[in-house]
Amino acid sequence: MSGSDDDRPSGGPSGGPTDDGVDDDGLHDGRWVTGPDGEGGRLVLAATPIGDPRDATPRLVGLLGRADVIAAEDTRRLRRLLAALGITPSGRVVSYHEHNEAARSGELVAAALGGALVVVVTDAGMPSVSDPGLRVVRAAVAAGVRVSAAPGPSAVLTALALSGLATDRFCFEGFPPRRPGERLRTFRALAAEPRTMIFFEAPHRLAATLTDLGEAFGTERPAAVCRELTKTYEEVLRAPLGELAAWAAAGEVLGEITLVVAGRPATSGPPDAETVERLVTRVRVRTVAGERLKTVVAEVAEEAGVPKRLLYDAAVRQPSPPPP
């Protein structure tokens, strides 16, 4: 994405720790004053709405209005948000995205060191979470600049809450690998994960990703596809992975996608005969394709939470299918 520096000629910051509005937050006792020699500059990661502009917090509105510098992932999307919120920024708006963040991070830190209030926003949600932001945070910390956050909407937590799956323990895995083989290996490594897992995914890869999740976790693993959260066409589908994969493959899926997948359930006692037979079938499919029996048994047993020896013995006893 591209953007441009505009709105205000380059120059020094518009003010220090008292005229950047921190008194409005009740934080005027020096806690914001950071950096060498007592400069009042700071870097704020500000969460933006994930869909509905009305989810913007009053604090976000205040920060965008009074910031000396707003660093935006997409300046055009930021301007649409500003217009929806009725905000006229008093500071400069600059682009800050994956293609320029390495170079621009130094500029933003330098501005904060000079006393500026620098606000970083991405297209939706919290900066640095599967979005630009981490580089400038590290640079600011290294330079002694105070880094703060203005929390707000989160696609991760919203999807988790709506999924109906366990919320007591969960992990965020971001975007899965794009390459099919690497993606499947990643999912197989996660198959024994007991916590609820949350992923982001592009709509055009959703069907393939759900299919690979079903291959790695089993098609009966509960999951939820959360689409267009907080927007007009919000949709949450809760079903086993196999059903969700079939749904995604049946038609075009549009919008922002967050996936929530149940963790591996705790097992008690040995698996029943039907479960063993199903797992042996999974083993046979892969060995017929040329994979080593011991390797496949180890992976499938780990994914399903069953003893490797039990599954290996069952696979050896079952006759191999005739060649196609």
Image (spheres, rainbow, N blue to C red):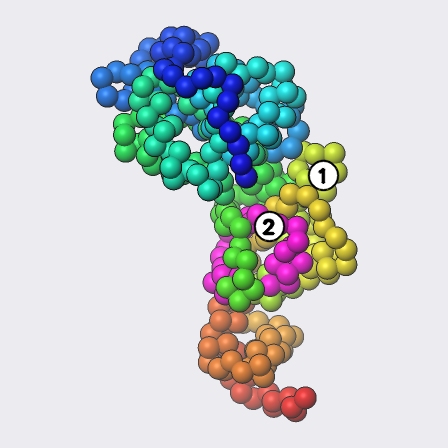
Other-residue count near label 2 (Cα within 10 Å), few / some / many at <14 / 14–19 / ≥20: some
Percent position of residue 323, x then y: 65, 90
Distance between mark 2 and mark 1 Cα atoms: 16 Å
Taking the spot 31% from the left edge, 22% from the top edge, the residue there is: 113
Percent position of residue 152, x then y: 54, 28
Q: Quadrant of residue 280?
A: bottom right
Relative image position of residue 47 (x, y in whole percent) = 52, 29
Sequence-wise, which precedes: disc 2 or disc 1?
A: 2
What residue range appears in magenta?
A: 183-212
Q: Main secondary structure of the magenta part?
A: helix
* Label 1 packing within 10 angstroms: few (<14), some (14-19), many (20+): few
Tag on residue 26?
Answer: none
Which of the labelled discs sits on residue 201, or is there none?
Answer: 2
Asked if the stretch drawn in magenta spans residue 205, the answer is yes
Regarding mark 2 in the picture, which secondary structure is present there? strand
Looking at the image, residue 249 lies above or below residue 307: above
Amino acid type for the residue under numbered disc 1: Glu
**In this view, the mark in front (2 or 1):** 2
From this view, report whether residue 253 is shown above or below residue 128: below
Would residue 16 appear left or right of 172 to someone viewing this image? left
Residue positioned 47% across, 41% down in the render? 98
- The residue at which mark 1 appears reads as 234
Element at label 1: loop
In this view, the residue farthest toward the left is 37
Q: Is residue 180 visible?
A: yes
Q: Of residues 121 and 299, which is closer to you in this image?
A: 121
